[in-house]
Structures are given as C-alpha cells and as structure tokens.
Amino acid sequence: MKIHNHKIPLAVYREIAAHLRQVEGIAVAYLTPIDREFSYTESQIGGLEITGANLLTDSAKIRIDSLLKYYADRYHPWQIESQPEIVNG
C-alpha cells in the first residue's frame, strides 16, 4: 500500500516509518516526492510504501491502523493509493 499526506514533515514520516517497522513482517520504503515546487508548509517526501500487510495477525493490523489514524487525526487524512484492510484513515 502507498500512502501520503502532504501536511506531514519528513521528520514525522521517519517517526511513522520507525513505528511501522516495529511490527513484525512490515517493510516500509520512502516514496520520491511528487514533482512540485519546494514549500516549507508541505511535506518533502512523496509518502510511504508499506508492504507485508497481507500476512499480519489481527493484532498487528489493529496496531498499524491505530498508528496511522493517530497521525491522520493530528495532521490531515491519509491519501491512500491502494486500500488495504488495515487502514481506516
């Protein structure tokens, strides 16, 4: 699944990725920014690609969902390129 939120700064994306990588079976990669002009008020990253979600336990899916919802509530709802069952954001 690919997700992005243009209101989240790079440092917060790194924090999110670190939390997601603590879930066994999850891999996270950073996406290249969309071709836009530089802006301090918008994200400097294109988003995250989260893989490995198909083989997770229910508790791991709930943990990921809760984490992504936490950040969506504080910044802005996630834009989801491919909708998995783990994100309600």
Image (cartoon, rainbow, N blue to C red):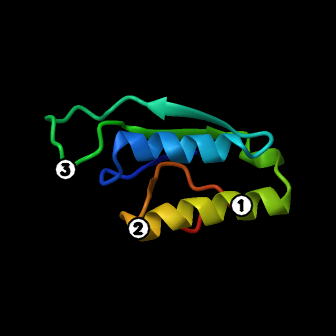
Kindly identify the amino acid type of the residue bearing the numbered disc 3: Thr
Q: Give me the residue at 37% from left, 40% from top.
A: 10
Tag 2's secondary structure?
Answer: helix
Residue drawn 72% across the image and 43% down it: 22
Residue 74 circle label: 2
Residue on which disc 1 sits? 63
Residue 23 x, y percent position in the rendering = 75, 46
Horizontal and vertical percent position of residue 12: 43, 47
Is the Cβ of the residue at disc 1 closer than 8 Å to that at disc 2?
Answer: no
Q: Nearer the viewer, residue 51 or 74?
A: 74
Would you name the residue on which mark 3 appears? Answer: 41
Q: Residue at x 77, y 47 (%)?
A: 54
Determine whether, in the image, residue 25 is placed left or right of residue 11. right
Q: For the residues labelled 2 and 3, say whether their Cβ atoms are less than 8 Å apart.
A: no
Whole-angstrom CA distance, mark 3 to mark 1, is: 29 Å
List x then y, in percent, for residue 61: 74, 59
In the rendered structure, which disc, 3 or 1, sits on the residue that comes first in sequence? 3
Q: Is residue 50 left or right of residue 14?
A: right
The spot of residue 64 in percent (x, y) is: 67, 57
The tag earlier along the polypeptide, 2 or 3, is 3
Find the distance from the CA under tag 2 to the CA under tag 3.
15 Å
Figure check: 11 above or below 75:
above
Amino acid tagged 1: Arg
Q: Disc 2 marks which amino acid?
A: Arg
